[in-house]
Image (cartoon, grey):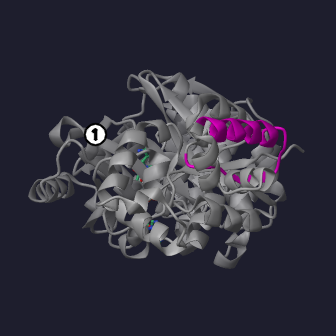
Amino acid sequence: MEQQNVILTGFMGTGKSTVGRHLAELLGCEFADTDVLIEERHGSSVAAIFAEEGEPAFRRLEATVAQELAQRQGLVIATGGRLMLDEANAALLAATGPVFCLTADPHTILARLREDGAQRPLLATPDPAQRIAGLLAERGPAYAAFPQIDTTGKTPAQVAKELQMLLDKTVLSVAYPQGSYNVVVGEDLLPSLTSLADISGPVVVITDTNVGPLYAAQFGPAAGVITIPAGEQHKTLQTVQFLYDELLAAGISRQATVVALGGGVVGDVAGFVAATYMRGLDFVQCPTSLLAMVDASVGAKTGVDMPQGKNLVGAFKQPQAVLADISTLRTLPPAEFASGMAEVIKSAIIGDPQLFLRLEAAPALVTPEDRIHWADVADFVTRSIEVKRSVVEDDPFEKGLRAVLNLGHTFGHAIEQASGYGIRHGEGVAMGLIAATTMSAELGHADESLTARIASVLIRSGLPTRIPHFLSADVLLAAMGSDKKKANGRLRFVLPRDIGDVIIVDDIPETTVVGVLRACGAS
Ligand SMILES: NC(=O)c1ccc[n+]([C@@H]2O[C@H](COP(=O)([O-])OP(=O)(O)OC[C@H]3O[C@@H](n4cnc5c(N)ncnc54)[C@H](O)[C@@H]3O)[C@@H](O)[C@H]2O)c1
Ligand SMILES: [Zn+2]
């Protein structure tokens, strides 16, 4: 397989060479430094070339080195400060792999330049820090063409590690009528929030009492953090009011970006606040539960519950970016992890037969220790998001098609509601997937064996498949009638015909529904 190069650019003193060497070691590949190559070829230092032959001669040498390196692959390349600001050089090298621009604040740059002891004309000016700030401002727009990695306060080894993570991630673009956003799936993404989500203004993190203490510090000291109590019972207008008050008290203006750090509850509440505070702020989702990664954070639905029912007030709010940092799942309670797996399995049934085969073949994901197959988990998340993306892109405002995403949910919601929410969403969905498949077989749309296949995958993920007997079919049927997803007062179901093939069926007789509920365990 062809190997890409990784190209580092940025102002002097941002650590390109040192970071580059560390990165090459991490990736197990060769390192090249354009200034060093030029010095070796020419037999004199960059400063001497400048002094004796002038800048244009040096730029010609740079162009030659750029052309040579563009013929090679699998290199980490640290480029001279201005090499990539030349359009021809940039076009040649950028075609061979990703480019990252290292940045740092002027004082850090000055300190690093003084430390390395090299003779720099810049250091001889009366106020070097101000001179550096001036040059940064001048070149900033040109460097802005590349993804920025802030190195201030980080060791070269830390920056290299961050770059390695960025190279390992998967990026999916989700389109909606007025634009698009990236969903990034990978490990240890949170420290790179601003570069990955392309945020320039102030950051306000909204998180909950479980997730905040574990992960909010990863955004660095500059981010403001507002914490709400964990739990669905706090997905209310009271919490929204509390958040408005906190934002106003902190003097947050429209330039700020709201970052949701947490499960679906935090995402829904923070998204609603971002949609409405000052008529809307930029919004970034950092989902930390499996359910939020594969479902809640993509599709732009936000909102809160009312005493009358769940999710009754809300708004569509497209995020600027979604960062699904898989490493946060290590602390997710096992039952929550299983709950998210229900949505992964649902996605596979809706639109990814290959994912379903993977789930059938994967080792059982029942205990927390089983969750060490992180590459698998990242892949499950990515594929589930791809299924959701393909559906929401075709129906951004939920006019119809999106209904397929409700596979298992008409039953699931009724089970959750009738149990007084003692049964988790994912558990209800798991039972609902079996009920929908049973109904499909009953109506002749699917083969009987499909139910057993789906049940086996659910069980291996630690999910229930039978509706508890204490729930009666009549109560469940009544609960379905109050589900806002019913079409014109008639019951509508999404039914699997096979893995990767679902249909929407309206007007199912109540007697059929009751029969299916009883067959699936209800009294
Ligand atoms: N907007 C949408 O499209 C959409 C889609 C599906 C679900 N939802 C909503 O999402 C909510 C459910 O989401 P959820 O299951 O993530 O619930 P949740 O947000 O309540 O999170 C579940 C629990 O796990 C904790 N937690 C989350 N991440 C953690 C981590 N990494 N480590 C330790 N603890 C962690 C939370 O604090 C919470 O106690 C519901 O309100 C539902 O309506 C929205
Ligand atoms: Zn769901």
Comparing 38 with 276, the one in front is: 38
Which residue is located at x 55 percent, y 43 percent?
82
On the rendered structure, is 50 left or right of 143? right
On the rendered structure, is 341 left or right of 139? right
Comparing 91 with 269, the one in front is: 91
Magenta stretch holds residue 400: no
Please identify the quadrant where the N terminus is shown.
Answer: top right
On the rendered structure, is 139 left or right of 325? left
Q: Looking at the picture, does residue 391 appear above or below residue 73?
A: above
The residue lying furthest to the front in this view is: 52
The picture places residue 502, in percent across and down from the top left corner, at: 67, 31
The picture places residue 480, in percent across and down from the top left corner, at: 42, 41
Q: Secondary structure at mark 1?
A: strand
The picture places residue 414, in percent across and down from the top left corner, at: 44, 48
Which residue is located at x 66 percent, y 34 percent?
89
Which residue is located at x 47 percent, y 36 percent?
142
The picture places residue 91, in percent across and down from the top left corner, at: 66, 30
Which residue is located at x 52 percent, y 65 percent?
119
Q: State the extent of the magenta-drawn residues as a range.
A: 56-81
Residue wearing tag 1: 314
Query: Which quadrant holds residue 318?
Result: top left
Number of residue marks: 1
Q: Residues within 10 Å of mark 1 (few under 14, many from 20)?
A: some
Q: Is residue 454 visible?
A: yes
